[in-house]
Image (cartoon, coloured by chain):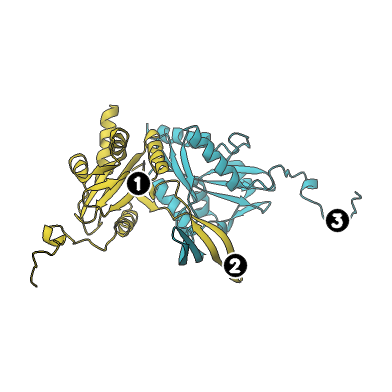
Chain colours: A cyan, B yellow
Amino acid sequence: MIQYPTKKKSLQSQGVSTKNRGMSLEHDLNITNEYYRVHEIANVHKKPTPVQVVSVSYPSRNQAKITEAYYKTPSTTDYNGIYRGTYIDFEAKEVTDLHRFSFGRIHLHQIEHLRSVVKHQGCAFLIIRFINHDLTFFVPFEKFDQEFKTTTRRSISLAWFESECAIIQNGFTPPIDYLPHVQQWIKEQHEKQY
Amino acid sequence: MIQYPTKKKSLQSQGVSTKNRGMSLEHDLNITNEYYRVHEIANVHKKPTPVQVVSVSYPSRNQAKITEAYYKTPSTTDYNGIYRGTYIDFEAKEVTDLHRFSFGRIHLHQIEHLRSVVKHQGCAFLIIRFINHDLTFFVPFEKFDQEFKTTTRRSISLAWFESECAIIQNGFTPPIDYLPHVQQWIKEQHEKQY
């Protein structure tokens, strides 16, 4: 195919990997959490999306059909569970922007929820994937919140994630093995205590 | 009013309290968990009911209206959260039967979920209210599971709960103060370890 000089450069020709395109972060996390559960490594679930049901009909005796309902704003994060006695709680976000994660992507009450988890000694974090770079970061919430509170910008740059946060390597089983990073967090908490 | 001798005795005339009738266990737990959150004692939420959405319409640009959906069987319990670094996970059930709690009221995968929580060192329990007696029990899952595995019956009697489990006293703020029982459980775990 002839590359006409006026043609806008595609991401691929800019050297950006498209390997994981289409396999969403949520999909990867569902498989990962199932892997953790089946192998009894951890018990983490995605919470159902909250729905406000307005009306229900009963087409047959044993079946309830919801005929009118609306999505509600979630009051907490999407994922929580337990790993080696430690409560873990996180939100996962895919970023299409090439250079920054906008604070608009996360609700204020989700930030407040994660602050509360930290206060109660749980492991709170974000998993943020820059899909066009195929980079997935493990973002301890304490670090994120520090930046959120101090920056004057309305976003965090990719460069910040690259310098401050660990990358979760892509894998096959499980696709997104985030627990070693939780383990590292637990270790650091113990070191702070003793 | 004349008490005809043939009239079936009402629960009230049997000395059964009807004080809390109408205030459902779920309602009481929602208020209790909100009380715990506001006072920063614990962070416990009820999970949304899982719904399988089949079709959605967009009556206006910013609104999504679900027009066909069905309730799904929950794969976990209704409540989970964190208290003083401990992961807690429980299911709450109201019992209308006067004398027994039927195992049919709890799904097998919920039992498996709670077993997994115990394995990962979380605090798993049931809150069971016999509404006609106005009695609410804190049922450590380990005890419940022991009975579930060994009994040949398909239910557990009220007498078993009365002899084996603690009663959660009715209160006003919060209406159902279950955390002291969780605290007791944590204490017992520490005693086992050391």
Q: Give the Cα distance between marks 1 and 2.
A: 37 Å
Going from the N terminus, do you reach mark 1 or mark 2 first? 2
Residue at the farthest top position:
B194
Q: Give the Cα distance between marks 1 and 3.
A: 65 Å
Numbered badge on residue B104 = 1
Residue with the mark numbered 3: A7
Chain bearing tag 3 is A
| Observer-nearest of B143 and B80 | B143
Residue with the mark numbered 2: B57
Residue ID at (63%, 37%): A170
Chain bearing tag 2 is B
Residue ID at (9%, 67%): B4
Numbered badge on residue B68 = none
Nearest-to-viewer mark from 1 and 3: 1
Are the residues at dot 3 and dot 2 in contact (C-beta closer than 8 Å)?
no
Residue A162 locus on image (x, y percent):
62, 42
Residue A138 locus on image (x, y percent):
55, 42
| Observer-nearest of A108 and A31 | A31
Nearest-to-viewer mark from 1 and 2: 1
The amino acid type, in three-letter code, at marker 1 is: Gly
The amino acid type, in three-letter code, at marker 2 is: Ser
